[in-house]
Image (tube, rainbow, N blue to C red):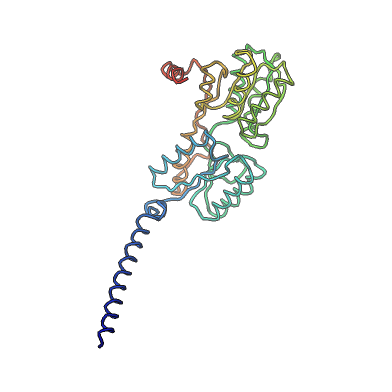
Amino acid sequence: MSRLSVMTYVFGAVFFVVSCSFAVFYGYKVLTHDLPIEKKQHEKYDYHFVLVPEELDNEYWRLVEQGAQAAATDYRVMLEYAGPKQANIDDHLKTIEMSAASKVDGILTQGLSDEQFTPLINRVVTSGIPVITVDTDAANSKRLAYIGTDNYYSGFLAGKALIQDTKGKANVAIITGNFYANHQQQRVKGFQDAVKGEEDIHIIDIVESEISRVRAAEKAYQIIKKHPEVNAFFGTSALDGIGIAQVVDKYVKPGKIYIVGFDNLPETLEYMRRGTINATVVQEPYEMGYRAVKMMIDLIKGKPVNPIIHTDTRIIRVTDLPVSYLNRMEESN
């Protein structure tokens, strides 16, 4: 063998060893560092669920997600939180359809409109994927269970609170998240039924905010301008009361307009501390999320599950907030 041949052979061998070393190194790096965490840990999960909220960045639904994620950690579930960025029924339905097509083990979703949701939920359940409705029911569908607020009762509580606080004399405007959603409809109906026997309480207008505090503020401003006799508001979604309060704070003297809102988001509680919001309906979104995941697991395992579970709902006023909490809020402002 010539000297040139030997050198060529040695060089080729060295190149081969170096190439293999790089291949092994980068292959290891990809396998241990670059794969998504979900894929690397997939073996550790027993179930794959999807939680579909009304809108992803809604503060209320983030609390539902927190509860669901806590349960997912406790019960070895891979939980996806997916849905429309802003409330949109078509995007909501598409998310459910895509989740079903990917053959997840269970779907947790808000129920919303009977007309559009019931046929889809029925198809999904018939295909073998269990569905639980959260926060808002689709009672006429084949969903296996519902967990959340008794929305009619929550509206009724708001009406009774207004009667008590205004001594049964008020001209009320209602700002609701939207007209098509079951839970918003039920809250309005509950409120109407609570006040219908009061001769001196009149519902002047009902408008929708499209689940937007900006739109709620716009609607509140328009109502105040168009109906100066309005001296009370009921906001049926978490953002409605906040939007109303922003307008009342800016354009109306404090205490002149009574506001009953929904949920206890930090901004709502701050407006309560300042006296702009007089009362709010409190739900249990974290509990809804946590228990919904546990219920889904029980259903899959064949355990009996109550088809309707109503979480706690109550009215709170500023006097119900701890003094220590009010002091902290005041110091931070």
Query: 236 or 267: nearer the eye?
Result: 267
Residue 210 location in percent, x, y? 64, 34
Above or below 230: residue 71: below
User: Relative to residue 309, is residue 36 drawn left or right?
Assistant: left
Query: Which residue, as the protein is rendered here, is positioned at the far top?
Result: 167
Question: Looking at the image, is 9 positioned above or below residue 179?
Answer: below
In the displayed structure image, the side of residue 37 where residue 200 appears, left or right: right
Left or right: where does residue 79 sit relative to residue 151?
left
Q: Is residue 12 left or right of residue 185?
A: left
Q: Position of residue 176 (x, y in %)?
A: 64, 30
Task: Name the residue furthest right.
Answer: 226
Image quadrant in which the N terminus is located: bottom left
Relative to the observer, which residue lies in front, 139 or 218? 218
- The residue shown at (72%, 15%) is 229
Residue at the spot x=58%, y=18% of the render? 161
Residue at the image position 64 percent from the left and 21 percent from the top: 233
Question: Could you tell me residue 99's position as x and y percent?
Answer: 54, 51
